[in-house]
Image: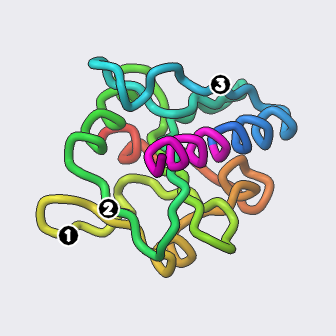
Amino acid sequence: MRIVNLKAKGTRGERELVKFFNEAGWVCIRVAGSGSSRYPAPDLLAGNAMRRLAIECKMVGNDKKYFDRDEIDQLQMFARKFGAESWIGIRFPTEKWHFLMLEDLEKTGTCWAISVELAKRRGLIFEELIGEGKLLQPSEENRNI
């Protein structure tokens, strides 16, 4: 039952972001089979006439989220081949969505991590990500990590 609830929570979060992007004048879709396909696929694809984003989404119940190497490698591979920026969207309890580039994740030995503090310090909130909060220039490094 717990796995079903976690999947439902993740789906709810992805749908929330799809709504945010579309209401902001972007287009955004959830990717069917992301995380369960043998082919790399992010949770969301979002874009406008200027930018394309490949986003891995996480709704977290505690104050830190760990990512294994394969999950990050697949996001990087997909984004590079698709010509998109790769981002992690994360939402901690009582917090807004924060978005981090892969280079902003904390390296912890064999995996990567995002804490609430790191997300607040290095991450962008939704309005900043889409360019309504501060001017963003997609970095070439983000595409080719």
Residue 118 lies, in percent from the top left, at: 46, 75
Residue behind mark 2: 66
* Magenta stretch: includes residue 102: no
- The secondary structure type at the circle numbered 1 is strand
Q: In the rendered structure, which amino acid carries the disc numbered 3?
A: Ile
The image quarter in which residue 65 lies: bottom left
Number of marks present in the image shown? 3
Q: Residue at x 33, y 24 (%)?
A: 40
Magenta range: 1-13
In front of the other: 9 or 141: 9
Drawn side of residue 111 relative to residue 15, left or right: left
Q: Is residue 20 left or right of residue 118?
A: right
Q: Nearer the viewer, mark 1 or mark 2?
A: 2
Question: Which comes sooner in the sequence, label 2 or label 3?
Answer: 3
Secondary structure of the magenta portion, mostly? helix
Q: Position of residue 18 (x, y in %)?
A: 72, 35
What residue did someone put label 1 on? 108
Q: Which residue is mark 3?
A: 29
Is residue 11 magenta-colored? Answer: yes
Q: CA distance from mark 1 to mark 3?
A: 31 Å
Q: Is residue 82 above or below residue 136?
A: above
Q: Position of residue 57 (x, y in %)?
A: 52, 46
Q: Earlier in the sequence, mark 1 or mark 3?
A: 3
Determine the secondary structure under disc 2.
strand
Q: Earlier in the sequence, mark 1 or mark 2?
A: 2
